[in-house]
Amino acid sequence: MTKKAALSASDVHLFYGQKEALKGITLDCYENEITALIGPSGCGKSTFLRTLNRMNDLIPGVTITGNVKVNEQNIYAPNTDTVELRKKVGMVFQQPNPFPFSIYENVVFGLRLAGIKDRAVLDQAVEKSLKAAAVWDDVKDKLNESALALSGGQQQRVCIARVLAVKPDIILMDEPTSALDPVSSAKIENMMMELKQDYTIVTVTHNMQQASRISDRTAFFLNGELIEVDKTKNIFLDPKNQQTEDYISGKFG
Ligand SMILES: Nc1ncnc2c1ncn2[C@@H]1O[C@H](COP(=O)(O)OP(=O)(O)OP(=O)(O)O)[C@@H](O)[C@H]1O
Ligand SMILES: [Mg+2]
């Protein structure tokens, strides 16, 4: 069976001013898989992740060449609606970033922006998204309380629910568990494995155990280059490249 690439980056170069942070990245991420991006600090993982929903557009002085296709459409085409794109390709950050509103209003934020007012529609989206983000039981009795009053792990899951509520196809996660305790991290890992049944996930992690536990495919970045990408099992048990082997065995990084 040939899998379908939900996301396809080809020859992506990115410069911050004169500095080339991505040196020609070609990578496919497949539907219903978790792709993990690994590599030492500063190798370009977050930069690459941001090219997948044009978040780098917001940074002054950035030049990008190459292309990224989402569901066969080049997202760098001039007529791309980046607001729509970022609904299709949602993003979760390292630090939970709930808005200073109620849990309910956090989850419906994108729906309200889209002009949806029907209370029943909003209520249903809240329940469904919080359930999918595995935080419904924690918060169902306090939906009108501030999201800021939740624990970090709960906040992160509410932020994930906020992304899910706008029905993305692809979810980008930049070290989503690195600010969390092991129990909260495990909940998010389990949730990610559930979510991949319905979504395509691309995640950055410094945690090798996490990459090997949850990802289907692992991509190793070094100095702005993609050194090796393969099924996760192959990367961890039988890497083809010496630098990959040195990194995963902890010789550097
Ligand atoms: N806004 C920016 N302006 C200028 N240079 C940047 C910017 N963001 C990142 N860089 C540089 O681009 C390179 C890649 O950074 P990036 O944040 O993508 O690395 P990373 O692999 O995510 O690292 P980490 O594991 O520490 O998060 C680094 O050299 C970094 O200093
Ligand atoms: Mg980063």
Image (cartoon, rainbow, N blue to C red):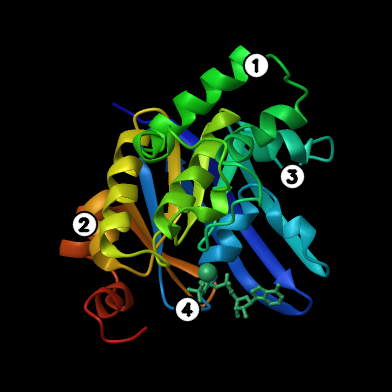
Crowding at dot 3, Cα within 10 Å, few <14 / some 14-19 / many 20+, comes out as: some
Q: Would you say the residues marked 3 and 2 are in contact, meaning their CB atoms lie under 8 Å apart?
A: no
Name the spot of residue 212 as percent of width and height, x first.
23, 57
Q: Would you say the residues marked 1 and 2 are in contact, meaning their CB atoms lie under 8 Å apart?
A: no
Question: Of all residues shown, which one is farthest toward the bottom?
Answer: 251
Q: Amino acid at mark 1?
A: Arg
Name the spot of residue 20 as percent of width and height, x first.
67, 75
Tell me the mark number nearer the camera, choosing from 4 and 2.
Answer: 4
What separation in Å lies between label 1 and label 2 (alpha carbons)?
49 Å
Q: Which mark is residue 119?
A: 1
Tell me the mark number nearer the camera, choosing from 4 and 3.
Answer: 4
What separation in Å lies between label 4 and label 1 (alpha carbons)?
45 Å
**Quarter of the rendering occupied by the N terminus:** top left
Q: Quadrant of residue 233?
A: bottom left
Q: Earlier in the sequence, mark 4 or mark 1?
A: 4
Residue behind label 4 places its C-beta within 8 angstroms of ligand 1: yes
Please, what secondary structure does the residue beneath circle 2 have? helix
Question: In this figure, which residue is indicated by the disc labeled 3?
Answer: 76
Q: Amino acid at mark 3?
A: Tyr
Q: Is residue 139 above or below residue 253?
A: above
Please, what secondary structure does the residue beneath circle 1 have? helix
Q: Amino acid at mark 4?
A: Ser
- Left or right position of 11 against 158: right
Q: In this orientation, which residue lies closer to the viewer: 69 or 61?
A: 61
Q: Is residue 186 above or below residue 76?
A: below
Q: Would you say the residues marked 4 and 3 are in contact, meaning their CB atoms lie under 8 Å apart?
A: no
Q: Which mark is residue 234?
A: 2
Question: In this figure, which residue is indicated by the disc labeled 4?
Answer: 41
- Left or right position of 76 against 36: right
